[in-house]
Image (spheres, rainbow, N blue to C red):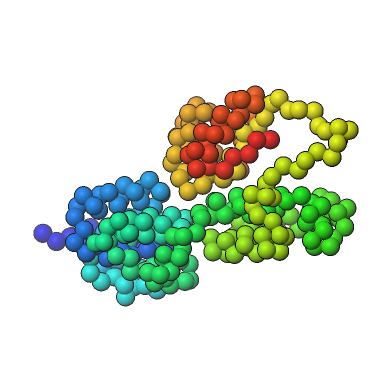
Amino acid sequence: MGMTRARKQEEIQELKGRMENSEIIVLTHNVGLDAKSITDLRLEMRKNEVGFKVVKNTLAKIAAKGTSGEKIADMFAGPIGMATSQDPVAAAKVAHNFAKENEKLVILGGVYGDMILDAAGVKQLASLPSLDELRSKIIGLIQAPAQKIAQITQIPAQQLRREKMAANIEKIVDELSALTVMEAAELSKALEEKWGVTAAAAAAPVAAAGPAEAAEEKTDFDVILAAAGGNKIAVIKEVRGITGLGLKEAKDLVEGAPKPVKEGAKKDEAEEIKKKLEEAGATVELK
């Protein structure tokens, strides 16, 4: 028995909602993929906060109207699986990695914003770090010592005082927050080339100038979740274990990064918390 008209309308609305609320749509051709493999794929997608649905093409084409999916409506032919996500790298990466191990799953392409992707475009996107990881990298580069930046850009160090920059900070933050994953990757690379530093080097501590300038050794630390990384579910689980928060509160904390996870912790405890979160894939700072 086929779908009732009411059920078809529900399906169309669900598909439209997925397309409207996603940064990326990746379409796959499921050539003889058995039920177990599809279940494994769904589980892997869900682990990475990616939606996946085997679609009816006629309904998908109707649902795509007025969304980014309309740009790839002609790809809805044959046995199609649709992956959707707010993190463009996650959807591309999971689909690409699964296809490498399962020849019966073929990536057709997709759409990212206004950009139509072929299979090679999805593969290229899958090779990038996640947007959270790129943002962390950019933060590391921006935190390079002021003297280094001043030397390279030929701006006197005293002109880098906060009051001189205050008028522009909000604008800079808004512009950085609006970057797509590809733009963030290009910015990170451009900063490394312009300033002659890498994210790892920029984050390295600066040696003390001498005993007179040495600060008193800290005993209490704030553990700051700088970015959740590509596996938010694992990070949320660790945050719950560390803080005792409920699922919703822990999820809000992780998604609101940068946020403090623990304040005023002793050095050993702070380092242990940092280790647990980093093993889950997060970027963590001790302050």
What residue is drawn where x is 61% and y is 25%?
A: 268
Q: Nearer the viewer, residue 20 or 122?
A: 122
User: Can residue 250 be seen here?
Assistant: no
- Callout count: 0
What residue is drawn where x is 19% and y is 55%?
A: 34
Furthest residue in direction bottom, as rendered: 74
- Residue 119 in the image: x percent, y percent? 37, 69
What residue is drawn where x is 50% and y is 59%?
A: 128
Tell me: residue 249, above or below residue 167.
above
| Image quarter (top left, top right, bottom left or bottom right) of the N terminus | bottom left
| Image quarter (top left, top right, bottom left or bottom right) of the C terminus | top right
Tell me: residue 131, above or below residue 203.
below
144 displayed left or right of 71: right
Furthest residue in direction left, as rendered: 1
What residue is drawn where x is 79% and y is 51%?
A: 146
Q: Nearer the viewer, residue 124 or 163?
A: 124
- Residue 136 in the image: x percent, y percent? 60, 50
Q: Nearer the viewer, residue 203 or 229?
A: 203
29 displayed left or right of 257: left
Task: Name the image quarter holding residue 9.
Answer: bottom left
- Residue 120 in the image: x percent, y percent? 40, 70
User: Can residue 128 be seen here?
Assistant: yes
Task: Name the image quarter holding residue 57.
Answer: bottom left
Q: Nearer the viewer, residue 53 or 212?
A: 212
55 displayed left or right of 130: left
Tell me: residue 246, above or below residue 1.
above
- Residue 78 in the image: x percent, y percent? 23, 69
